[in-house]
Image (cartoon, helix red, strand yellow):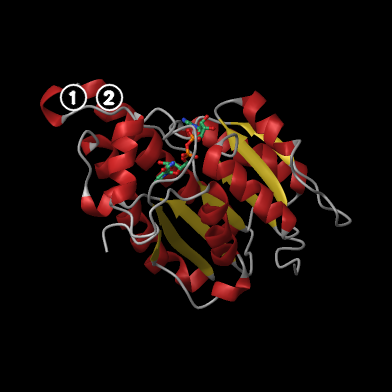
Amino acid sequence: MAMKLAGRLALVTGGGSGIGRAVCVRLARDGASVAVADLSADAAAATVGLLPAELPGQRHAALAVDVGDKASVQAMLARLQEQAGEPPSVSVSAAGIIRDQMLLRMDEEAFDQVIRVNLKGTFLVTQAVAQSLVSARAASGSIINIGSIVGKVGNMGQCNYSASKAGVEGLTKSTAKELARFGIRCNAVLPGFIETPMTAGIPPKVMEKLIAAVPMRRMGTPEEVADVCAFLASDDSRYITGVSLEVTGGLFL
Ligand code: NAD
C-alpha cells in the first residue's frame, strides 16, 4: 500500500480503544506519525505499542487528555507541538461515551456528561487544532470528526447521545465553511453499529434485532471505519469538505 500520509502528523483522540485505535493503526500504516490521545494514558500507550514505524522520522506518541476540558486539550496540543515541532495536519476526534437511558428517566448528569465529551470535546479539539494550523500558516489540514448514524435518525435510549452526534455534524459543516479558505478540510464519519467495547454491552437479543435492520446483515469492524478516515485524511479526498460519510452497511437507507 502506498504511504499516502508519509511526513504527516496525525492526532487521534479516543485512540486508546475501538475505532480510535484502528484509526491510529491505519494512519501509521499509511506513513503518518501518530499522536494517540486518550483519557486513559495506559490505553494510549498500549495503542502506540501496536503501531508500525517503518519510515525514517516516523514517531508515535501517547498523550493523556480529557477532551471535555479546555485546559487539558490545550496542554495536550502544546506538548505535542513541542515534541513534534509542528501542529498535527490530520486530526481525528473519536473520543466518545454513552450514558443510555430512556428520555422519561434520564437524569441531567447523564445528558451533560455525554454532551461534554462527545460534542464539547469535539469542538475543543477542532478549535485548538484549527488555531494551531492557522497560526503556523500550514499549507493544509484535514479534520475528521466521528459522529454517528443515530445523530441523523435517533435511537431509543440515546436522546443524549444522538443529540451530541447531531451536534457533531452541524459543528463539522460550519467548521468546513469557515476553514476552507485556510486550506483546512473538515468532514464527519457516521458509523452504524461497529464491534467495539462501546457496543459489547448490548444484550445478544437486542443485537440480533439491530443486525436484522442492517442490509449487509452484520456489524461493521473498527477497521472499516478507519479505512474511511484514512481516505478523508489523505489527498485522495482533497476536494471533499463538509460532508458526512456513512459507514453503516446500508442501515437506515
Ligand atoms: P470505545 O469506548 O471503544 O472508545 C472510546 C475511547 O474514548 C476510549 O478509549 C475512552 O477512554 C476515550 N474517551 C472517553 N472519554 C474521553 C475523554 N473525556 N477524553 C479523551 N478520551 C476519552 O468506543 P468506540 O466504539 O471506539 O467509539 C469511538 C467513537 O465512535 C465514539 O465517538 C463513538 O460515539 C463513535 N461511534 C461508535 C459506534 C459503535 O458502534 N461502536 C457507532 C457510531 C459512532
The residue at 53%/47% (across/down) is 222
Q: Secondary structure at mark 2?
A: helix
Beta carbon at label 2 within 8 Å of ligand 1: no
Look at mark 1 in the image and give the residue it sits on. 106
Q: Quadrant of residue 105?
A: top left
Few, some or many residues within 10 Å of mark 1 (<14, 14–19, 20+)? some
The answer to whether residue 32 of the structure is visible from this angle is no
The answer to whether residue 143 of the structure is visible from this angle is yes
Q: Secondary structure at mark 1?
A: loop
Few, some or many residues within 10 Å of mark 2 (<14, 14–19, 20+)? some
- Give the answer, above or below, for where 115 lies relative to 214: above
The residue at 53%/44% (across/down) is 19
Q: Position of residue 18 (x, y in %)?
A: 54, 39
Question: Relative to 167, is 127 on the left or the right?
Answer: right
The residue at 53%/61% (across/down) is 228
Amino acid type shown at disc 1: Met
Amino acid type shown at disc 2: Ala
Question: Relative to 245, is 183 on the left or the right?
Answer: right
Q: Position of residue 210 (x, y in %)?
A: 30, 44
Question: Relative to 86, is 113 on the left or the right?
Answer: left
The quarter of the rendered structure image containing the C terminus is: bottom left
Residue 110's label in the rendered image is 2
Front residue of 197 and 136: 197
Question: Relative to 136, is 102 on the left or the right?
Answer: left
Q: Quadrant of residue 122?
A: top left
Contact (Cβ within 8 Å) of mark 1 with mark 2: yes
Q: Position of residue 240 (x, y in %)?
A: 47, 74
- Give the answer, above or below, for where 203 lies relative to 237: above
The residue at 60%/34% (across/down) is 16
Q: Residue furthest left?
A: 104
Q: Position of residue 45 (x, y in %)?
A: 70, 30
